[in-house]
Amino acid sequence: MDRAAISDQIERILRSRSFASKSQLRKLLEVLSNNFDSQTTLKPDRVIKELWPEETKTKGSADVATEMNRLRHALESYYNEEGKTDSIAICLPNRSAPGPDGKPEKRWIVARPREEGTAGSQAASHTASEDQRPIARARVLAFLKLAAAVVAIAIVGYFAIRMLAADSRPQFGRMDASALTIFNAEGKELWRKVFPDGFGPDVYYAQGITTRIWFGDLEGNGHTSVLFLYSPAHPQPNSTILICYSDRGQEKWRWTPGRNLPELAGSPATYKTYALAVLKPTKTSPSRIVVSSAHDPWWPDQIALLDSSGKTVSEYWHSGALTSMVLADLDGDGRQEIIAAGVANGYDHQATLVVLDPDRVFGASTEVRPEFQIHGMGVAQERLRLLFPRSDLNQALFQYNQATDPVVEQGIVRLTVLECMSPPGCPIWYEFDKNFRLIAAYAGGDAFRSAHARFYASGKNAHPLSAEEQAAFQKVRCLVGCKSEFVPVGKLVP
């Protein structure tokens, strides 16, 4: 099978919605992809070093096996959903079982052709099911012994849950034509809302409804609220509307992002909300809603904090869209910080990461280019503000690079910087420790290297991707929150 086609398939999986929040599995898949042509000599020690650079001595083959099993399930989910029509299936063989030649399987990863339109992931499912057989046989006797003991408890638990009205709790939603339908955990329809203006534009809901809806106990009263980001289908730009529903489908309030700014020179105050999250309550603060909304089509971005009744508590303004956001307790004090990623227009349109203390969300970012400075808001006090370098490829072809998909796992902050904007891709992956020391900066997969090679294949500027260019990715500038101009570099992952 064509190696380039396999690389493209793996890159598609890495950029998929299914893997968006699975940074450790993305890293594992990339390790396997990078060793695709030499995988028979790939040892677990090498994988451990790649996945847990700071915990090499405490990790073993069993941890690798666990991650491999997690990756199998993630691949199966991908092919059952957004990868249904993909022509290539990426599978993980059972290395404890004989291979095609009857000898122990040495391959870690294989690629197989799939029939277009095949529902599900037949190849991946087949491999995964083979991998589960030894585990199932080993556990079946223990399971049968326990079954009789737990069946009574399960029955009692089931009816207890039903008595507690679990069926009435909203769990997920679906958009059909002009209706939003809400379901319980069992897939039973609870209620629906019809929007005469329909949903749109298509790009806003391109990844489905998952990132545009939230379910949880917003008021701390044991009832599930539903927050839905509604974007109406109109030929002219319209602002997103955040709508809050009760668990029974009663509309409780609506909130519209943004405001008129003199910097927009009369352009209508139309804003799209691209990130939605809810801060966990603490002893001193109730739950608060966090939304990041960018002006359409210009550059101001508003991060607003709302209370449970939809009232704006505070707001921070940034010169450049912050389209990705995650909440995490970075310093272990029991309070979450706001971590937003996007573009800094006021600094050469560079990819940026901004960290805010939720109790200090105010003011506007300070910009070096006066045409992008937002006035009248006061001076913001970000906890951290980083700028990521633009590659020569990005500067030659595009107006900006963009940071996206920040995640925090086990004290490690990871994010992707896209160097190609059309189509989005050519990722450079960054990792920081909890003190924001840089521990990794590298091109994800072959996409960036291939794009660089194609563009600089000929002409007076023709050159291969040099070690100096790759080292330049480590030059992450720190505008706020560091003691030096650039973030300190820790022990880099090789």
Image: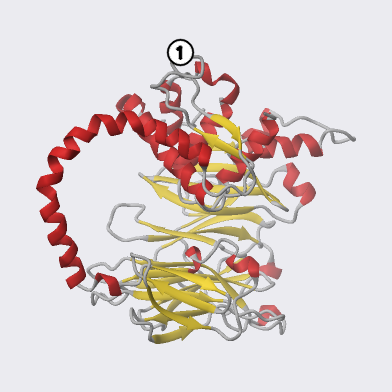
Residue 274, above or below 61: below
Residue 172 picture quarter = bottom left
Residue 438 in sight: no
Identify the residue shown where x is 58% and y is 76%: 177
Residue 133 in sight: yes
Identify the residue shown where x is 44% and y is 80%: 192
Q: Position of residue 478 (x, y in %)?
A: 54, 50
Using residue 219 as the reference point, say whether residue 363 is left or right of it: right
Using residue 274 as the reference point, say whether residue 361 is left or right of it: left
Using residue 306 as the reference point, say whether residue 159 is left or right of it: left
Front residue of 483 and 188: 188
Using residue 233 as the reference point, say whether residue 453 is left or right of it: right
Residue 472, above or below 227: above
Residue 1 picture quarter = top right
Q: Position of residue 149 (x, y in %)?
A: 9, 46
Q: Residues within 10 Å of mark 1 (few under 14, many from 20)?
A: few
Residue 416, above or below 38: below
User: What amino acid type should be assigned to the residue bearing mark 1?
Assistant: Lys
Q: Position of residue 22 (x, y in %)?
A: 45, 46
Q: Determine which residue is flagged by label 1.
A: 103
Q: Secondary structure at mark 1?
A: loop
Q: Position of residue 246 (x, y in %)?
A: 35, 81
Front residue of 446 and 324: 446
